[in-house]
Amino acid sequence: MPTSSTLGTDLHADPGHLSDPSDLGDLRDWQSALRAQFPIVTGHPGLAYLDSAATAQKPQAVLDAVQTYLTTSNANAGRGTYTWANETTALVERARDRVKRFLRDPDPVSGRSTVHFTSGTTEGLRTVARDWLVSWLRDGDEIIVPFADHQANAQPWLEAQRLLSKRGIRIVIRDMPYEAESHDYDQTALAALVNERTRFVAATHVHHVYGANMNVHRIRRTVGPDVPICLDAAQSIGHLPVDVGALDVDFVVFSGHKAMALPGSGAVWARGARGPEFRPGGWNGSPNTTGVVSLTAALDWLEEAGTERIERWTVGLGARLTEGLRHLPSYEVLGCPLSLAADSGVQRRQGIVTFRHRGISSNDLGFILSSHDVMVRADGHCQARSGEEESSVRVSLHVYNTVEEVDRLLDVLDGLDRQTRGAVTC
Ligand code: PLP
């Protein structure tokens, strides 16, 4: 069996806090106190919501912040001179600082980095493509796109290529290479792709199907100091510490709703230092002020809860689930096989576990689980590369999920495994 070193996998700088993900005992009280803060979760004790990669539930603090804003100072931002308008403008500016601090922006006060609010990751990536990339690229330039990731991180770059082509500017798009076994980006193959015409790399922090932490900090070493890197952080914000300085990326794009803020909120953080300044162009209209207020409250809540501990908890639950699935022969777990076992030396899988039953369609499995009050996602998960749209069942965990919920899911899956084992050829 290959080891992490034969796969070239360079784990987190400090993987110590993830070394025994199945041992969550010391976090139980901490987690119960946090879970109690989610009204939708406590209001439905019989239901297990295991679809947080689609959207996360909201803690009371976020609901309160929105309610307080709407009942005390709701106005438009950046327009008007009366108190509520000024307060709203100040809230939006404060939210920019909040995002910078949450991302551990090494230089938050210089004003060189910027935060632009969007409706989510899709719009954020499209804004980087439309309002920055097209002015950065020149005829004959090359860009690298991760086609095995979410299509939101492929379509905008293809659209930029089409737009430039209409202006007579030809851009070459190269496929980001992946290691076959770990599903990590293949840094050796990437190094071979990079040349003096490489002008941009798009990457993903945590894969939305395989749960893999894509070791994005290694990309800078591979592509050199001058190539801008844009990071889709949709599945990492709120799930693990995100440090833009350590990752050494130029754009970080994420959805507020996946990070416990309201739907229709999100942000693009842009470093000021490399390439032309990121200035989303045109008239942006009125901002989603309640979304922005909810984002500040969500990031406050997440920081207070502690993203290191959230990561430990969700990685631990994911390891428990993959370990359980390993003993059920009817199921095939997608992604890196080395990160499946709780005692694996390679623990890179965040709290996302995706699998198929060898004899039951994933859509049927989704319905069966729903009839047992377990909510999961069952479809092709919007992967960009064609051929990867075959359905699977994705379980995605957050801090409000419990060991008992994972065990309930495993019980149902175990029952199906027993019922169908005779009929399935593995
Ligand atoms: N990128 C990744 C990795 C995702 O998982 C998702 C959504 O699931 C998106 C982008 C798109 O996010 P949104 O629909 O919030 O724009």
Image: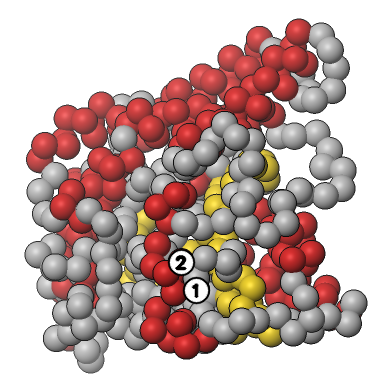
Give the x, y percent position of residue 65.
54, 20
Residue pictured at 81% horizontal, 9% vertical: 82
Asked if residue 264 shows in the view, the reply is no
- Residues at badges 2 and 1 in contact (C-beta under 8 Å)? yes
Query: In the visual, does 213 lie left or right of 259?
Result: left
Quadrant containing the N terminus in the rendered view: bottom left
Residue pictured at 72% horizontal, 22% vertical: 89
Between residue 406 and residue 315, name the one nearer to us: 315
Q: Is mark 2 on a helix, strand or loop?
A: helix
Between residue 402 and residue 99, name the one nearer to us: 99
Q: Which amino acid type is marked by label 1?
A: Val
Q: Is mark 1 on a helix, strand or loop?
A: helix
Residue pictured at 41% horizontal, 29% vertical: 301
Query: In the visual, does 129 lie left or right of 234?
Result: right
Q: Mark 1 sits on what residue? A: 223
Residue 340 in which image quadrant: bottom left
Between residue 360 and residue 112, name the one nearer to us: 112
Query: In the visual, does 420 lie left or right of 277?
Result: left
